[in-house]
Image: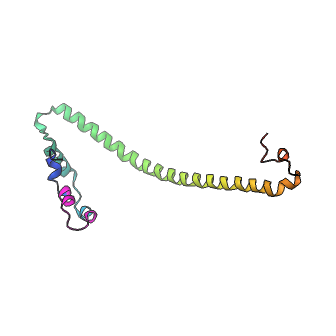
Amino acid sequence: MAPFEFILNSAEFKCFSRPQGDVEKLLSAMPKMTAADITSRMKDALDINEQFYDTAKKEKFDRECKEFQHFSRQIVPLLREMQKKIAIYMQNKSQSIQDYKIMLNMLDKYEELNLANYVEGKEEKMVFGNTQ
């Protein structure tokens, strides 16, 4: 981690590496960084100098970023909703499989205990346990 000074000098890492209490509480108490703060931190860490970049390329990248931002704002809520629905579906499916196993077990026991009397104990005449 030594080559990454931006990590070592960050407030988050200092809070984590030299804790003065519960680390999770300290990290959650830290103020949220604004987009401008994140941008300036990344520019400093990656040694980006905007003056050396072509204006047309910068505008193109900026436009692509805005398009992605617009797309993500539309799609992320849909994905979260889908995730909730899939979780509910999986829970229902799991319960259904469990219920089905119980029902099959009950049918097996029913046939063993009751139907065996009606078919005089002959397995080939049984409905559920018939292997043929």
Residue 20 in the image: state x and y as whole percent.
Answer: 19, 67
Q: Vertically, is 110 above or below 25?
A: above
Residue 21 falls in image quadrant: bottom left
Residue plotted at (77% across, 47% down): 129
- The colour scheme is rainbow
Q: Main secondary structure of the magenta part?
A: helix
Residue plotted at (77% across, 42% down): 131
Residue 111 in the image: state x and y as whole percent.
Answer: 79, 54
Q: Vertically, is 48 above or below 93?
A: above
Left or right of 13, for residue 83: right
* Boundaries of the magenta span: 12-25
Q: Is residue 19 magenta?
A: yes
In depth, the one of 89 and 60 nearer the eye is 89
Left or right of 64, for residue 95: right
Q: Is residue 14 magenta?
A: yes
Residue 1 in the image: state x and y as whole percent.
Answer: 18, 47
In depth, the one of 113 and 8 nearer the eye is 113
Left or right of 94, for residue 114: right
Residue plotted at (31% across, 39% down): 67
